[in-house]
Image (cartoon, rainbow, N blue to C red):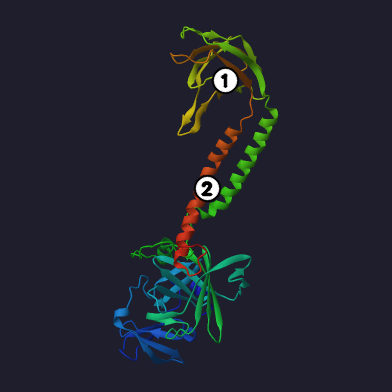
Amino acid sequence: MDGSEINSVNNLPSAEILECPKCGSDLRLTGFLLTKNIACGKCHSLFAYANGNLKVIKIFKKEKKKHNHIPIGTKGTIDGRKFEVVGFANYREANTPYAWDEYTLFNPIHGFTFLSVYEGHWNYFEQTILRPRPQGGDVNLNGDSYRIFNRYKQKTDYALGEFPWDISENPSTITEYINPPHILAHDKDTNEETWFLGRYITPKEIKEAFNLQSHFPEQTGIGSTQLHSSAASLSKVKQITLYVVLSMLVLQIILSISARDKIVFKDQFNIPGNQAGGIVSPPFELENTLFGKSNLQVELIAPVHNSWMEADITLINDKTGEEFHFEQGVEYYSGYEGGEAWSEGQNYTDNTLSSIPAGKYHLNIFPATPPDGGPGYFQLKLTQDVSMLSNFFITLLIALIFPIALWISISSFEAQRWMNSDFSPYSYE
């Protein structure tokens, strides 16, 4: 066999069939010299395999048998390479109820790889000769930081098929480091250590890889390496938001520098005694600005005291007849209560009209005061092309809504991920 025959579908080499010494059932042997353990699915015996010999080392309890979602002997393709499922095991974190399934895959050229599933979340692992660099309690591999997520000793509850090491005893300590969607698993005992590099893989990808129609376990919670659906775009969103904010800031600076803040009208008016009379202001002119149209700030002051004053105002273009209608009012009250002075309101108010074209204008003003009296006069001041910081901050807030909402969503997602870790950076007190 030169390996070329495994490049086409279903051309992986055939397994050798051994007889179970305990019950006489067929045992598949695919890894040959690489296989260390073989487990019988009928009598639940686990054998050590060496030099063609089988020696029983453990018998699993029948009630520990787990459902195998990818049957032994199933062939599939992952990352363009052909694999056959040769082993299935159910592991448990020692002294805890946390259990997961692991499928052993074999290819005579690429060796053994593994599919691990916990609460419906899958990871695909390959052994790696790369050695991460320690980084505090975490590690760094090829410039990427992996944060410690879990550390435990594992116990084998059930096994079926063949395995490249002794799974009957697990004296080693396993430490997991994550950088979603990737994971590093460090398996260390007194004599040696092994590193595995894995990545998150969806149930859909696995079903397509092995041409499966079977029902997979439902996903629960957030997987240790599961990516938020928009996590990959967060950095791009941050970058775009930064460009938008900088552009808005530059535009605001330009608008502030170019703003004329020109007083185009200022006058004082007596309030008619009949309460029904209107006031026509002297004409005034709004000049052309950098953007053609401009805003117009209207300030109203009236000497109200324990009273109020309102004005119905219409700004009229003398040439086109275009009208801009608005209302403004002031009120101020004060007194003493419980030996303490109080007050509310003020005698000043302002209003800003936007996008007013250049031209000659006048005001039609209809003031109103209480029937029992009020101020005898009021003042109006109109300022063209005022610098408006409020518009900048409103637009800034709108521009930040989506990135902030996305950040909150991803932060919540990450907090849920780390709820299953003893090394969580989040506090759950």
Q: Nearer the viewer, residue 338 or 89?
A: 338
With respect to residue 205, does 45 lie above or below? below
The answer to which of marks 2 and 1 sits earlier in the sequence is: 1
Amino acid tagged 1: Ile
Query: Picture coordinates of residue 174 (x, y %)?
Result: 50, 77
Considering every residue shown, the one lying at the far right of the view is: 257
Horizontal arrangement in the rendering, residue 105 relative to residue 192 (left or right): left
With respect to residue 96, does 271 lie above or below? above
Q: Which residue is mark 2?
A: 404
Location of the C terminus (image quadrant): bottom left
Q: Which residue is mark 1?
A: 301
Query: Picture coordinates of residue 267 (x, y %)?
Result: 62, 13
Q: Tell me how far mark 2 sits from mark 1, CA to CA.
A: 41 Å
Instruction: Kindly state the secondary structure of the residue where label 1 is placed.
Output: strand
Q: Nearer the viewer, residue 156 or 305?
A: 305
Tag shown at residue 347: none
Q: Say if residue 8 shows up in the picture.
A: no
Q: Residues within 10 Å of mark 1 (few under 14, many from 20)?
A: some
With respect to residue 295, does 250 lie above or below? below
Q: Say if residue 262 shows up in the picture.
A: yes
Q: Quadrant of residue 167?
A: bottom left
Instruction: Kindly state the secondary structure of the residue where label 2 is placed.
Output: helix
